[in-house]
Amino acid sequence: MFEHLDPRSSTPLYAQIANRCRVAIAAGELHPGAALPSVRHLAAQLRVNPATVVQAYRDLEADGFVEMRQGAGTFVREVAPEGRARERARQASALVRQLLADAGRLGVSLPELQAAIAEEIGVGTS
């Protein structure tokens, strides 16, 4: 779940960690009651400061995705279907923004991008 963290990204590592968890919860990959890795374990695995993981978990708790239990760990909370749908929509918007930014850097025009998307999803093909 955390294999694509980018330390060179302008997005802080704690936000990348929290975002990966949000995506996994919204997609149903992490189920209510599931334990997240301990702060110490995840920090060692990712080779980051434990405070980075704590900040990610605190952000997730503030957003209602997890519950931190002193001495027991961090657990996925039940997220209402509307909350999961909102998160998926937020992630979809982020993907589109990234796609548009990447296309702009490459000099791909909007019509070219639309044609490529249509081709990939099979629109207009038999």
Image: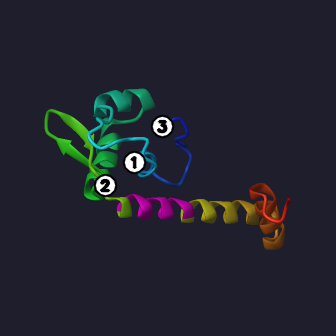
Q: Is residue 81 left or right of residue 5?
A: left
Where residue 58 sits in the image (x, y, percent)? 27, 50
* Location of residue 45 by image quarter: top left
Q: Badge 1 is on which residue? A: 25
Whichever of labels 1 and 3 marks the residue nearer the N terminus, that label is 3
Where residue 55 sits in the image (x, y, percent)? 31, 48
Of the 4 image quadrants, the one containing the C terminus is bottom right
102 versus 4 height, above or below = below
Q: Badge 3 is on which residue? A: 1
Mark 3 surroundings within 10 Å by alpha-carbon count, few (fewer than 14), some (14 through 19), many (20 or more) = few
Residue found at x 55% / y 65%:
93
Residue found at x 55% / y 61%:
92
Q: Which numbered dot is residue 57?
A: none
Tell whether label 1 touches label 2 (CB within 8 Å). Answer: yes
Q: Is residue 44 left or right of residue 74?
A: right
Residue found at x 61% / y 65%:
97
Residue range corresponding to the magenta coloring: 83-92
Where residue 116 sits in the image (x, y, percent)? 81, 61
Where residue 122 sits in the image (x, y, percent)? 78, 58
Which structural element holds mark 3? loop
